[in-house]
Amino acid sequence: MIVGPSSHFKENQGIDWQNTRLDINKIPEEVLSFGSIDLFEDRLGRKIGAPILAIKGKKPGPVLGITAAIHGNEINGIPIIHEIFHSLDPNELKGTIIGVPVINIPGYLNYKREFIDGKDLNRIMPGKARGTPSQEYAHSIFSRIAAYFDYHIDLHTASFGRINSHYIRADLTHPVVNELASLQHAQIIVHTKGPVGSFRSASVKSGHPAITIELGNPQVFQNKLTVEGIHSIENVMKYLKMMDGDIIQPRIPPVICKKSYWVRCFDGGILEVYPKLIEKIEEGSVIATLRDIYGRDDITYKSPEAGIIVGKNVNPVVSTGDRIIHLGVIGDPPPLSQP
């Protein structure tokens, strides 16, 4: 079980292994080890390596991968990875758990969502060898690290100017993915197969069940969400028989949404958004008002249908096409796919 930091295992100090790809066979058993996987070279020819935390149990079992910060300003997953790995007892672990606290190293260093060429890494997975900088980097992430996961949890937050509830993105028609989603201590679960090129959809397409956990707001640590994230990942490990113990049910069951989408502005100006996160609203509910730069010409925006607020814009300065609310439409997703 996860017991909190203690001296019941030897913790290797510093970077004690460095490879060009993840090699499960070379990870030391029954210790927390720290490594680095070479991904890319910058404009000075210096290697960029992804930091890796790894624990390989003495007993056989699956490989669970947990990744964070594929968007460089979405860092709420980092303390979740830290807490899990620094408090897990390797002697009780069955299988291997791999943590990558920062996927997008350049974005993280520059407080930016995108990669150095302005592209979103979460829209070009699994990348492309001999492609653009972002395609090459994405290809390295997928082929050198994620390809060796049996199961994958990708940790995200909202981006600058927006806030999120604690919610799950998952293809609920996939039987195993559906189970992984149901184990989460989230407020909302949104059914979506995922956009083409997302880390999650690329993992599922490659035969590795995956979910995305959205954890609040950008460029901050939120302790309550850290605790909920740890409980959720513990549940996954128990479901996969990687650790013993009973699955902890969430205190409040999550709201299931059959789909979700962003309601957007059709004008520019100064926006005020009214609903709160996880608030349920009706069709026609007033969700925002927009004024021009002189403070006149109020435009009222209403919800196109009933639903729940998954996320919202908190940046009052908007242009045509900017986001207002992320609306989840409550309802059962399509039935499970047949094996």
Image: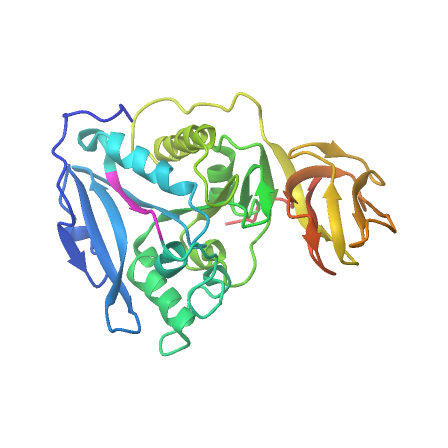
| Residue 110: in magenta span | no
Indicate the quadrant where residue 38 lies.
Answer: bottom left
Q: Is residue 331 visible?
A: no
Query: In the image, is 254 to the left or to the right of 10?
Result: right
Q: Residue at x 81, y 36 (%)?
A: 282
Vertical arrangement, residue 289 with respect to residue 49, above or below: above
Q: Residue furthest bottom?
A: 130
Vertical arrangement, residue 234 with respect to residue 324, above or below: above
Indicate the quadrant where residue 320 lies.
Answer: bottom right
Q: Residue furthest front?
A: 294
Which quarter shows the N terminus?
A: top left
Q: Residue at x 37, y 71 (%)?
A: 136
Query: In the image, is 261 to the left or to the right of 141?
Result: right
Q: Is residue 314 visible?
A: yes
Find residue 101 and report its horizontal and vertical position in percent: 34, 47
Magenta span: predominant SS is strand
| Residue 98: in magenta span | yes
Foreground pick, 334 / 202: 202
What span is colored magenta in the figure? 95-102
Find residue 325 and report its horizontal and vertical position in percent: 69, 45
Foreground pick, 339 / 314: 314
